[in-house]
Amino acid sequence: MTATAFWILYTYLLLATLHLLLFSIAGIFYRQERRTDSPDRRRRFAVLIPAYREDSVILATARHSVRQLYPEDLYDVIVIADSLQPETVAELRSIPVSVLEVSFDNSSKARSLNEAAGAVTRDYDAVVIIDADNLMEERFLEKANACLNTGFRVLQAHRTAKNTSTPVALLDAASEEINNHLFRKGRRALGLPSALIGSGIVMDRALYSELIPNLKTVGEDKELERMLLKKRMTTGYLDDTLVLDEKVSRSEVFQKQRTRWLGTQWQMLSETLPELPAELLLRGNIAYADKVLQMLFPPRLLLLGGSIMLTALALTGIAGPVQLFWVGLLLLQVATFAIALPRSFRTVKFLRATLQVPGLFLRMVRALLSSPGSGKTFIHTPHDDHSTTRKDNV
């Protein structure tokens, strides 16, 4: 490696690490969003559940969703049924929830949400979006309503794992919590909008009707976040409002899921990067610039895995003239993730699970190589029914 190549690569990885470290430290100082609970300011919610071939999990999710500790006449659960079996649809209607059957040549969550826009009439004040495998805690609507009372128009709830039975699922759960610390707690502590995840999203009904029809990609959460950032709108984060989400249990599903995510990242970067000069220099949109930076930098697993490899090469004298630089970079990354990792994951079981990291790193590299262009095609990842795994928490 030439000296010039070394410094370019090292600077890029160092900036990516410092960016994460900033949010990791900031996340320590996060404070819960304000709430104002008032019986005369209770909104009527539409809970939307897009379900594409999710016969194995949608019934449990629908049954759980109608058990909110919130006035029954002030919320409706609407399942957007795409390619569900007829017997599943019939059973859904008996729960009872509303069922909106849809069919597309090329299915996507964005198309389902857009199709549901017509059902979200002025009778509703706010919309909740969850995935077909998600379980909302029973006070979800109550907490969301109280926070909307303070002026927020968009909220992101705390999505957390409902299954950690395999090493891959446990690592995926830890990754989710690190993301929550960095890009939700950390961003809010610095006065920036919370990042969206894709489910557990609460939106003002009028805003939903305005923005959802503009979604065009399979990365609907990133596209929606981009629109919100351009509108200079602040997304709040509800750390104490849980949505249980199924984590991938097998490495091959992990690769499939990450291929979709990386494809979306490539596509969003190609659309947001040209807008960066105007948003930052003309409008002073720091939040938008930060989001572009996040997409410019590598995913955490590639960052950590790549740094470990380069540090090992440096110690053999191959990857650069200054060995301590690589060691220092790796230690910064370890500190960043250690701060963001919740104490509940600091166990022997988790340490054993980290033995899977090298294999997942290789899966991530394969996902990166196959990701260009995948952001335009919906890649469905299968789910299993873990509805009883953590039901005591919701």
Image (spheres, rainbow, N blue to C red):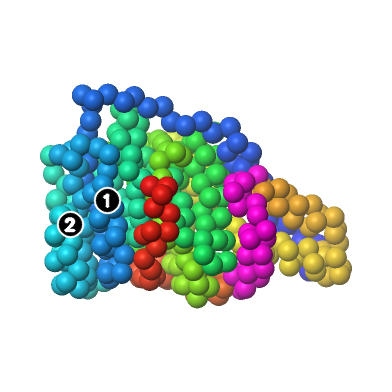
The residue type indicated by label 2 comes to Ile
* Above-or-below relation of 394 to 251: above
Q: Residue furthest front?
A: 392
| Total residue callouts | 2
Q: In the rendered image, which residue does mark 2 sit on? A: 95
Q: Horizontally, is 105 left or right of 230 in the view?
A: left
Looking at the image, can residue 12 be seen?
no
* Above-or-below relation of 57 to 331: below
Image quadrant containing the N terminus: bottom right
Q: In the rendered image, which residue does mark 1 sit on? A: 65
Image quadrant in which you'd find residue 319: bottom right
Estimate how packed mark 2 is, as few (under 14), some (14 to 19) or many (20 or more) residues with alpha carbons within 10 Å. few
Secondary structure found at label 1: helix
Image quadrant in which you'd find residue 102: bottom left
- Residue drawn at x 23%, y 49% as measured from the top left: 66
Task: Give the percent coordinates (x, y) of residue 359.
Answer: 62, 73
* Above-or-below relation of 259 to 40: below
The residue type indicated by label 1 comes to Ser
Give the residues in magenta. Answer: 339-362
